[in-house]
């Protein structure tokens, strides 16, 4: 199965599995209902080295790769998607800082993330700019030595709990090229003018914070620019090429967890005098799930393996994200089906997994955007 993984990577998988089964399995439903998660778990996960493993050693991380990061997230999502999302998003955007941040920014902001002392977010989406990120209008104007930010972001993970957020801002509205108009700024969330309103009763992954953000004359020093002014769009695309690979890993984890629940259930549940596992149709369903998961995991591994060698391939990342997330939605649907009516009740975790799965086809590029990228690349059209 894990033919391309080193022994160390396999050990990381086992350690992440042990942590997830020991710490997350029992509290997933409660966290979903309370729309919250225990903060001490973050510190615990950090002490065990599960947070931001891809962050370089000089910035407080373990200096491992995206494959290790994706594997840890897969194991967390296998056990609980809501808490998986909490842990996945603690460092959401740290890649951007690692690739494009100044040495001062990396030294200041990355080590506390790895220690579990800080949480970040990355705010791109706006009411009128979703898939079309290049149409974002949140304005950052340079005034002397500062940028002054005004605008509104929506559906931002960690908006009310983050210590700082990266903000995708319009800095060059006069530019004719849409890919040269934006810049990425870092905003500490205790700045005057920053406001976050939590969104409640999402369809799923409710333990994870999602918020609408308002920037009202938020002032940040010019040193908070990430990378190059006007280069926000290509910087963002490079970030997505990485983040899509581990959203794909979320899909693999969720699908794996759903299939295991179905396997347990069909071995116990009896109808017509037999375990429903003995019906050939059930065996076919499990066979299809296992095969789909295997293909998705292989694609995630290939994508991460390449990213870890500096081979950034937008098409491959989009393929991994689309396919693995599609696999998650298909597998969880059949897994719930095998639970019959009981799957529709919240007595079993499968119902929570089912609700969680859909987000995977929406954020980090909808499935349509993923397929558009793949198709355009293959056909050589823009
Ligand atoms: C729980 C949650 C967490 C989130 N976290 C974050 C976050 O941390 N940071 C952040 O910035 N955003 C976040 N988002 C927002 C998310 O990234 C967007 O919802 C997503 O990018 C889609 O944008 P939209 O909702 O505006 O949909 P739209 O872009 O309006 O799309 C609507 C539909 O039209 C389709 N469509 C759009 N354009 C095309 C096209 N050219 N061709 C074909 N079909 C098209 C889409 O595929 C989709 O089916 C989050 C959302 C949720 C629900």
Image (cartoon, rainbow, N blue to C red):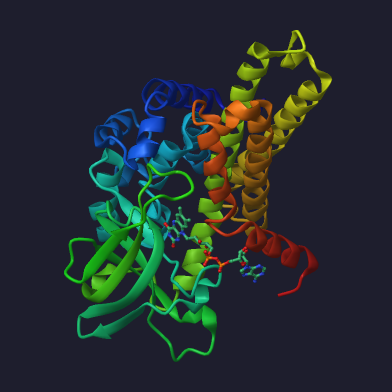
Instruction: Decide which of 321, 62 is in the foreground and name it.
Output: 321
Instruction: Decide which of 137, 373 is in the foreground and name it.
Output: 137
Instruction: Decide which of 117, 156 is in the foreground and name it.
Output: 156
Task: Tell me residue 294's x, y (percent).
Answer: 69, 32
The residue lying at 34 percent from left, 52 percent from top is: 158
**Viewer can see residue 2:** no
Q: Is residue 304 above or below residue 127?
A: above
Instruction: Decide which of 88, 94 is in the foreground and name it.
Output: 88
The quarter of the picture where the N terminus appears is: top right
User: Which quarter of the picture shows residue 25?
Assistant: top left
Q: Is residue 11 left or right of residue 358?
A: left
The residue lying at 34 percent from left, 43 percent from top is: 35
The quarter of the picture where the C terminus appears is: bottom right
Task: Tell me residue 197's x, y (percent).
Answer: 29, 61
Q: As drawn, which residue projects farthest toward the top?
A: 273
Task: Tell me residue 301's x, y (percent).
Answer: 62, 39
**Viewer can see residue 324:** yes
The residue lying at 23 percent from left, 54 percent from top is: 108
Task: Tell me residue 183's x, y (percent).
Answer: 39, 74
Q: Is residue 364 left or right of residue 20?
A: right
Q: Is residue 91 above or below residue 151?
A: above
User: Which quarter of the picture shows residue 253?
Assistant: top right
The residue lying at 63 percent from left, 36 percent from top is: 332
Q: Is residue 257 left or right of residue 11?
A: right
Q: Is residue 335 left or right of residue 66?
A: right
Q: Is residue 81 above or below residue 226?
A: above
């Amino acid at each position: 199965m894990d033919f391309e993984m080193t022994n160390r990577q396999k050990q990381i998988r086992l350690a992440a599995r042990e942590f997830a089964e020991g710490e997350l399995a029992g509290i997933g439903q409660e966290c979903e209902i309370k729309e919250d998660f225990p903060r001490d778990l973050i510190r615990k996960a950090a002490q065990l080295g599960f947070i931001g493993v891809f962050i370089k050693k000089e910035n407080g991380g373990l200096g491992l790769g995206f494959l290790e990061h994706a594997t840890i997230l897969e194991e967390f999502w296998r056990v609980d998607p809501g808490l998986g999302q909490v842990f996945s998003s603690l460092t959401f955007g740290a890649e951007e800082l690692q690739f494009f941040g100044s040495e001062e920014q990396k030294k200041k902001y990355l080590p506390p993330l790895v220690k579990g002392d800080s949480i970040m977010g990355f705010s791109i989406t706006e009411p009128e700019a979703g898939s079309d990120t290049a149409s974002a209008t949140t304005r950052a104007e340079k005034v002397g030595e500062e940028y002054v930010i005004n605008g509104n972001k929506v559906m931002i993970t960690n908006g009310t709990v983050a210590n700082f957020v990266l903000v995708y801002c319009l800095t060059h509205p006069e530019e004719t090229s849409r890919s040269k108009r934006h810049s990425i700024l870092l905003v500490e969330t205790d700045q005057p003018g920053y406001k976050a309103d939590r969104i409640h009763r999402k369809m799923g992954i409710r333990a994870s914070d999602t918020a609408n953000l308002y920037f009202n004359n938020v002032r940040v020093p010019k040193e908070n620019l990430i990378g190059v002014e006007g280069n926000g769009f290509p910087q963002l695309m490079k970030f997505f090429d990485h983040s899509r690979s581990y959203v794909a890993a979320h899909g693999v984890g969720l699908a794996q967890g759903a299939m295991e629940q179905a396997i347990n259930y069909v071995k116990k549940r009896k109808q017509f005098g037999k375990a429903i596992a003995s019906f050939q149709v059930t065996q076919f369903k499990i066979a299809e799930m296992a095969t789909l998961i295997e293909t998705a995991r292989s694609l995630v591994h290939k994508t991460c393996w390449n990213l870890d060698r500096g081979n950034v391939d937008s098409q491959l990342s989009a393929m991994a994200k689309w396919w693995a997330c599609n696999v998650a939605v298909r597998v969880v649907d059949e897994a719930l089906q095998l639970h019959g009516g009981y799957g529709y009740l919240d007595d079993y975790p499968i119902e929570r997994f089912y609700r969680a799965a859909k987000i995977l086809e929406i954020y980090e590029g909808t499935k349509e955007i993923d397929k558009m990228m793949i198709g355009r690349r293959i056909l050589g059209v823009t």
